Amino acid sequence: MPKLRVHGFSLSLDGYGAGPNQDIDNPLGVGGKALHEWAFATRTFRRMFGAEGGSTGRDDAFAARGFANIGAWILGRNMFGRVRGPWPDDSWKGWWGDEPPYHVPVFVLTHHPRPPLAMNGGTTFHFVTDGIHAALASAAAAAGDRDVRVGGGVANIRQYLQAGLIDEMHLAIAPVLLGRGEHLPAGIDTAALGYHCVEHVPTASATHVVIAKRKQ
Amino acid sequence: MPKLRVHGFSLSLDGYGAGPNQDIDNPLGVGGKALHEWAFATRTFRRMFGAEGGSTGRDDAFAARGFANIGAWILGRNMFGRVRGPWPDDSWKGWWGDEPPYHVPVFVLTHHPRPPLAMNGGTTFHFVTDGIHAALASAAAAAGDRDVRVGGGVANIRQYLQAGLIDEMHLAIAPVLLGRGEHLPAGIDTAALGYHCVEHVPTASATHVVIAKRKQ
């Protein structure tokens, strides 16, 4: 059985994973971009988008870890795009252009069916309308011997976390206050679900922690 | 006007400042003690309770800063003790023995009047029944040229924070999940209140941040 993993999920000091009022100019919500400064500076992130340079220290090691041994992704609808409700047509193909940075099958949770969408570079978006367990089963089958990574948004990760299905989750706590937005842990008793902090690596840009279902 | 300061306030990764079910065996709530491991190891903390040794690095510098130039404290009722409702008598004198580690006037917020209580070493507990603004006015008068420190519990700090009265707050985010308990920032839009993160010092034991009402 592959592991279900979350990586590079940035949180504000007050626990928000995205700012309020997501729109085309603010895909991470107002103020949300500041959460990800630690990642933008890394070589892994820059290469993903075809840029040179970038840091190669501990922040980068965490960014890179998120792409190792991943055979499929699961994304929430809002992470895939800004369209709400039924798909008006097939014109929206994600935020990432013709060659998205996934390179494996990606399962998008939605209430609205749509045929699979094959992109350049090995990414195919599959639209799953029958819930998180069905998406996980399909993603696990597609991943084979590799693991499944759960991407954002916050609501998507909250669903898998609340169901106790996530095996390990890397969070990067950024030195930023948002005050409002989408809160990751609110109302989820992670300790009762069996999660512990198993890794704690602070850097100048963020505090990296890994929580997992094994003993501290 | 003295500053109103919070220091050494420990939070879990999920934002809790104390665990659930405070009682005589768990004055910080179940699991709450783990939040403060960074502080227990410091020389400042150990000296406060008459012990030798302790760390002298960045954790200790933050612990020490919390006692510099403080002329009065404000505490919540539950921080002072486990007694709830009207005081049955004057026998409860705080958690700290005959010589509490404050050495200045301490204003305890309560709904139930009680005469001032002078302890050894310069600490006098004053019981304030007319709210947070009255307590602040009395504490500021007592502090003179020095600042006022707001101690716990969580509810006490939340009241002053929500009212925008806190000038600076040092938080220590510990690599611990609590899952339940008393949440510090829930429902308080610190960004809208004008707070920014102005200092970010991660150590192996905690991520120290200072939030304040000045520009980032």
Image (cartoon, coloured by chain):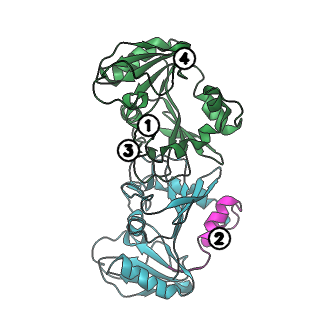
Chain colours: A green, B cyan
Q: Are marks 4 and 2 on the same chain?
A: no
The amino acid beneath tag 4 is His
For residue A103, above or below residue A173: above
Q: Classify residue A89 as left or right of residue B178.
A: left
The amino acid beneath tag 3 is Asn
The amino acid beneath tag 1 is Gly
SS type, badge 3:
loop
Q: Which mark is residue B47?
A: 2
Q: Is A108 in the magenta?
A: no
- The residue beneath circle 1 is A194
Tell me how far mark 1 sits from mark 4, CA to CA: 32 Å
Circle 1/circle 4 CB separation < 8 Å: no
Closest to the observer: B98 or A9?
A9
Q: Which mark is residue A103?
A: 4
Magenta range is B44-72
Chain holding disc 1: A
- The residue beneath circle 3 is A21
Q: Earlier in the sequence, mark 4 or mark 3?
A: 3
Mark 2 vs mark 3: give the one in front. Answer: 3
Chain holding disc 3: A
Q: Are marks 2 and 3 on the same chain?
A: no
Tell me how far mark 2 sits from mark 3, CA to CA: 49 Å
